[in-house]
Amino acid sequence: MKTPITTICSALVIMLTSSFSFAAASPEDVRSASVIVELIDAAQPGALVDVPAGTYEGKLTVQKGVRLDGRGMVVIDGGGEGTVVEITSMDVTFRGFTVRGSGARVTGEPAAIRVMAGNVVIEDNHIEDALFGIDLRSAPDCVIRRNTVRGKDLEAGRRGDGIRLWWSHNCIVEDNDIQGSRDMVFWYSEQLIIARNRVRDSRYGLHFMYSHNTVLLENELVGNSVGVYLMYSNSIRLIGNTMINNRGASGYGIGLKDCDDITLKNNALLANRVGLYIDNSPSSVDSVGRIADNMVAFNEVGMLATPITHDNVFTANAFVENEQQAATHGRGDLSLNTFYEEGTGNFWSDYAGYDLDEDGVGDLAYEPQSLFASMLAKEPNLRLFVYSPAQQAVELTSRAFPELRPAPTLVDPVPLSRAPVIKTTSNSTMTSGWPMAILGLGLVAISGVSCWRLSRIGSLPARIPGNGKRGAA
């Protein structure tokens, strides 16, 4: 009897399916990391070592100057114990690996990759499930490029740093993607170039301590507690960076503390709790800070400074629809700073003056004298009433009784009547027009929030329950 063709086809399908299922179910090729050590031992200094595809378990120590390449097909798994890869020799390249599974105990500060020597290149690696991502210690002249770092799934307070440099000068850190870490931090490291990195969902996007003579170029810091924070670091240039929605307990887009010779140019500070925070910077009497051509928009406070802040020059910046354009902690003003240069002031979206000759410069000085803002500086909980009839009533009272009106927070004698074009640079996730699109959407959002707040005023309780404090974002 002839076998029906359908029966034959069915049998072939079952055989093929079984074969593929068996192949897929075969155990992964897992070897010891000592295999890579043997390859390094057999290579000449400076040689290219192509590591065969597969997963390697255990710790890898690189003690010879070779070029290691995993070509995106090699996994090194530390098994949750200590540091996974440690490089102790100069002139090493470590490229194209997935490194995962460092220890989680803070005491040993375990990292996915730790570098203990100079002139090392770490590039095109994927790091996951690591307490510290890439850690350089006394490792000058290194390059950290195009790496992806994902921290361990821990509470923010228990995380390690995504990238950390300690006493490592003349390094380049560029095009890295960091998420879910503590900081990208630089200690006692000078002459750095930090370019086009993206940091999200972390504590401090970029954090500098006692690190001087550095350029921060086109980095994107989104959704962190703080975007960039500079402490005791001098001669820093921040150019073309983007800080969006950094709204933790501090919530600064950029924070400066006791820093001299700082330049901020072409940065976009959008929708942070505070766009720019200045604490005693510059700290030296002969130093000047320069803040020019930045977009500061839709923050709760555009710029916040300590009352002793002095010798900063602000020019050609756009302060757009911040709840408070500029403020100081407690009592004080910004009179020790200059808000124009060579006849060019800044654009203020709440400027109520005019420009009769249409030369782009307002005919009246910008002198904000808000009684509500003065009250807000002393009692932050009043922010609940921003854009409400209560705020309007306070401001109306100050206009009706000029003796209640506070002194101006600042004076811009030549405010711009038209918003300048801010040439914020872009990286792979942004287009050059994207910040302006955010501004347009922000205007709609602010209008909606204002209407919502107005609709709720009638239902507010007579007093705020508890202490009335707002929770940290």
Image (cartoon, helix red, strand yellow):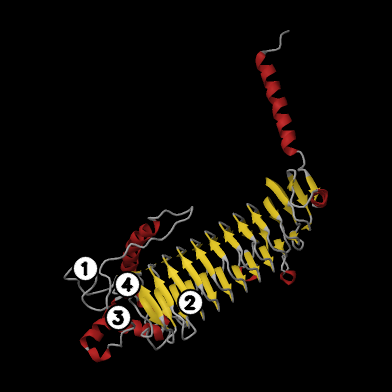
Which residue position is annotated with label 3?
368
Tag 1 near tag 3, CB within 8 Å: no
Count all numbered tags in the image, as a single digit. 4
- The residue lying toward the viewer, choosing from 44 and 447, is 44
Residue 177 sits above or below residue 344 on the image? above
Within 10 angstroms of label 3, few (less than 14), some, or many (20 or more) residues?
some
How far apart are the two marked residues, 3 and 4, measured between alpha carbons?
A: 13 Å
Q: Which quarter of the picture shows residue 83?
A: bottom right
Within 10 angstroms of label 1, few (less than 14), some, or many (20 or more) residues?
few
Q: Disc 4 vs disc 2: which is toward the camera?
A: 2
Residue 12 sits above or below residue 360 on the image? above
Please state which amino acid type lies under the numbered disc 4. Asn
Tag 4 near tag 2, CB within 8 Å: no
Which residue position is annotated with label 2?
261
Q: Disc 3 vs disc 4: which is toward the camera?
A: 4
How far apart are the two marked residues, 4 and 2, measured between alpha carbons?
A: 21 Å
Within 10 angstroms of label 4, few (less than 14), some, or many (20 or more) residues?
many
Q: Is residue 224 left or right of residue 26?
A: left
Q: Position of residue 157 (x, y in %)?
A: 62, 71
Which residue position is annotated with label 1?
359
Disc number for residue 346: 4
Please state which amino acid type lies under the numbered disc 1. Asp
Precedes in sequence: disc 4 or disc 2: 2
Residue found 69% across the figure and 69% down from its top: 138
Precedes in sequence: disc 3 or disc 4: 4
Within 10 angstroms of label 2, few (less than 14), some, or many (20 or more) residues?
many
Q: Is residue 324 left or right of residue 154?
A: left
Q: Disc 2 vs disc 3: which is toward the camera?
A: 2
Q: Which quarter of the picture shows residue 446?
A: bottom left
- The residue lying toward the viewer, choosing from 340 and 268, is 340
**Secondary structure of the residue carrying numbered label 1:** loop
